[in-house]
Image: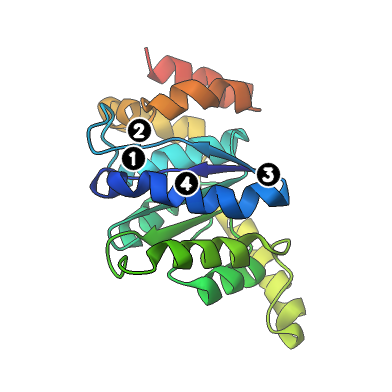
């Protein structure tokens, strides 16, 4: 699995701490981590939480990433922005039980965490516990056991609803403010990883056109 890490500007200074905890947990599982930044508060590309949603949608819809780990001060803005786009099911995750239940019940492909609120002593431990519970089992297994069948049915219903309520990403992006989109897709990590990992030529060509 290709896991993308994205930090917005207010929490960029914590990128290295989050990346370290994520890699320590998921690399022994056989997953790869791709750090799309921001790497520090001094980065040229300053991502807002709205731009996180754009970047996450491009990565997930194109197959450049299979999962996105992101967040902001509270995690709320990043979650809302991610869920504004097709192909993204993002949960707000604070602790390990959130992570496990989101994975097993909702079977999403992104989480948004609070990297300011409650991010104090022992924060790196909480990160590791979250990532352990998030990726320890294949998503969609259901929890508790007696709720597996209706939960899996509801996930399929949600996917079908989203297919009808969201348009194609390549229709959406050109209609957004061009500078907003270019800013979201101008991180050092995007330039480094996207083209090599992208599996969708339509989205790849759309991105190239937008970045001209």
**What percent of the width, then of the height, locates residue 177?**
27, 31
Mark 1 is surrounded, within 10 Å at the Cα level, by few (under 14), some (14 to 19) or many (20 or more) other residues, namely: many
Indicate which disc residue 184 carries.
2
Residue labelled with disc 4: 19
Residue labelled with disc 1: 51
**What percent of the width, then of the height, locates residue 176?**
32, 33
Indicate which disc residue 82 carries.
none
Q: Nearer the viewer, mark 2 or mark 4?
A: 4
Mark 4 is surrounded, within 10 Å at the Cα level, by few (under 14), some (14 to 19) or many (20 or more) other residues, namely: many
Q: Is residue 134 left or right of residue 21?
A: right
Compute the Cα span from label 2 to label 4. Answer: 20 Å
**N-terminal label among 1 and 3:** 3
Q: Is residue 53 visible?
A: yes
In this view of the protein, which residue sits in the foreground, 24 or 154? 24
Residue labelled with disc 3: 1
Q: Is residue 194 left or right of residue 210?
A: right
**N-terminal label among 3 and 4:** 3
- Please say if the residues under marks 1 and 4 sit with CB atoms less than 8 Å apart: no
Tag 1 secondary structure: helix
Tag 2 secondary structure: helix
**What percent of the width, then of the height, locates residue 89?**
53, 56
Compute the Cα span from label 3 to label 4. Answer: 16 Å
Residue at the image position 29 percent from the left and 45 percent from the top: 13
**What percent of the width, then of the height, locates residue 126?**
46, 68
Q: Nearer the viewer, mark 2 or mark 3?
A: 3
Compute the Cα span from label 2 to label 3. Answer: 23 Å
Residue at the image position 26 percent from the left and 34 percent from the top: 46
Q: Nearer the viewer, mark 1 or mark 4?
A: 4
In this view of the protein, which residue sits in the foreground, 203 or 195? 195
């Amino acid at each position: 699995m290709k896991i993308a890490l994205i930090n917005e500007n207010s929490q960029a200074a914590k990128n290295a701490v989050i990346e370290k905890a994520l890699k320590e947990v998921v690399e022994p599982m056989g997953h790869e981590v791709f750090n799309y930044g921001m790497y520090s508060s001094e980065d040229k590309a300053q991502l807002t939480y709205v731009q996180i949603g754009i970047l996450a949608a491009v990565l997930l819809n194109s197959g450049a990433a299979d999962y996105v780990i992101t967040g902001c001060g509270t995690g709320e803005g990043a979650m809302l922005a991610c869920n504004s786009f097709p192909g993204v099911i993002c949960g707000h995750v604070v602790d390990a039980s959130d992570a496990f239940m989101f994975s097993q019940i909702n079977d999403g492909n992104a989480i948004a965490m609070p990297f300011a609120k409650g991010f104090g002593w022992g924060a790196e431990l909480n990160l590791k516990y979250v990532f352990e519970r998030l990726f320890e089992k294949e998503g969609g297994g259901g929890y508790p056991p007696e709720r597996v069948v209706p939960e899996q049915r509801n996930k399929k219903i949600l996917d079908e609803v989203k297919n009808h309520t969201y348009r194609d990403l390549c229709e959406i992006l050109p209609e957004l403010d061009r500078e907003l989109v270019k800013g979201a897709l101008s991180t050092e990590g995007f330039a480094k990883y996207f083209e090599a990992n992208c599996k969708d030529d339509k989205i790849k060509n759309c991105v190239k056109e937008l970045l001209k």
